[in-house]
Image (cartoon, helix red, strand yellow):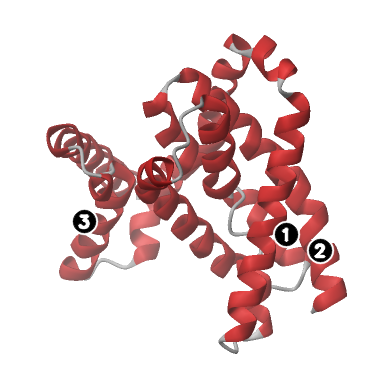
Amino acid sequence: MFWTSLIFILITVLLFIAMKKVYKKWNSPFLIPVLTTTFVMILLLLFTHIPYEKYMAGGKWIEELLGPGVVALAYPLYLYRESLKRHLVSIIVGVFTGTLVGVLTVFLFASAIGTNKRIILSMLPKSVTTPVAMEIARLTHGSPALASVFVIIAGISGAVFAPRWFNWLRLKTPLARGLGIGTSSHAIGTSKAMEFGEETAAYSSVAMGLSCIIASVLVPLFAAWFL
């Protein structure tokens, strides 16, 4: 089991490094490493008929690094703490509005196409980081496993399309960009925000954390009232 775990860890890490080189060479939003690595890894498991459970014997140790990775995002917060204090009201209002709109749009869209109630409850916390989204889904009687899938989709789509949205909407300030991507695309979006500068990443980190708190209160209340 030890060697199997080690092999899958090495394969995943080496694949991610290779995909980073591909991304740097062509610099397309559709080639972000987290997307291409996931896609290639899925194909590899399908063609080799390796069960997901066997892969996760090693993959789970990479997953455990999510916590320390999120904590590391606090570094930009320290560097730009004075700027964050100056924009405190804008941050709170912006993240609250973004979280509320995210929940409402998911609910309206899913209801319009006749989605099952349990699936809707699993979709509502899609924009917050995985551990929090799974707990919210569990609390509201949704599916934690489905919630994690929707979180990944939200994160990757945000990282892919954020640069285009920034250009279309002419969002040029670190505050606007950071709050937008952090509120809608959690840690994956925040990692993308680093490409726009440390200040953007600082605002994104704050938005990611604040949206978790707001969603933890807002989603259960929304579920109780409307579902």
The extreme bottom residue here reads: 114
Q: CA distance from mark 3 to mark 1?
A: 30 Å
Q: Is residue 101 left or right of residue 188?
A: right
Q: Which residue is mark 2?
A: 220
The three-letter code of the residue at mark 3 reads Val
Q: Which mark is residue 40?
A: 3
Q: Nearer the viewer, mark 2 or mark 3?
A: 2
Secondary element under disc 3, as helix, strand or loop, is: helix
What residue would you read off at disc 1?
136
Q: Quadrant of residue 105?
A: bottom right
Horizontal and vertical percent position of residue 47: 16, 69
- Going from the N terminus, do you reach mark 2 or mark 3 first? 3
Asked if residue 143 can be seen in this view, the reply is no
| Residue 169 at least partly seen | yes
Residue 21 sits above or below residue 74 on the image? below
Residue for point 76% across, 61% down: 219
Q: Residue at x 76, y 39 (%)?
A: 93
Front-lying residue, 4 or 159 = 159
